[in-house]
Image (cartoon, rainbow, N blue to C red):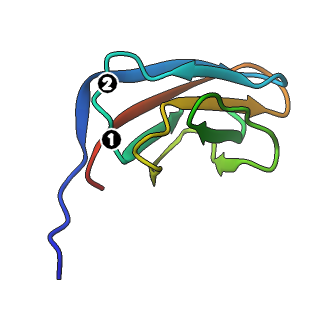
Amino acid sequence: MSEQKAFSPASNGTATLTATSSSSSAKFAGVAKTNQVVVTNVGTEVVFVEFGEDAATASATSYPVLPNSQVTLTKPIYYEYVAVYAASGSHTVYVTSGEGL
């Protein structure tokens, strides 16, 4: 059985995005390549998140993150882009790369 470790954020590993009805994306800057990301939705509506290798576009069919919640997701290590989307409004989303659960 493998040991599960608490999430350890990468240095300068947080991207701040605004989820709106148009997909918004960013490249993780200054981050060592990692498998895990913590997505924090501080907004009041569900937002959707998508990861990509050379680009990313989020839509209503992407991974949903509930309002005022946080989830840890695993992505391919070479995916360096993240995108967020919301059906309406404007919602802040923090995406932090690192390792662990």
Label 1 sits on a secondary structure element that is loop
User: Where does residue 60 sit, x and y in percent of width and height?
Assistant: 82, 44
Name the residue rendered at 17%, 83% in the picture: 1
Q: What's under tag 1, amino acid-wise? A: Thr
Q: Is 58 rendered above or below residue 24?
A: below
Within the image, what quadrant is residue 47 found in?
top right
Alpha-carbon span between mark 1 and mark 2: 8 Å
* Quarter of the figure with the C terminus: bottom left
Label 2 sits on a secondary structure element that is loop
Residue position for label 1: 34
| Disc marking residue 31 | 2
Residue closest to the eye, 83 or 17: 83
User: Where does residue 14 sit, x and y in percent of width and height?
Assistant: 38, 23
How packed mark 1 is, by other alpha carbons closer than 10 Å (few <14, some 14-19, many 20 or more), is: many
Q: Is 65 rendered above or below residue 93?
A: below
Q: What's under tag 2, amino acid-wise? A: Val
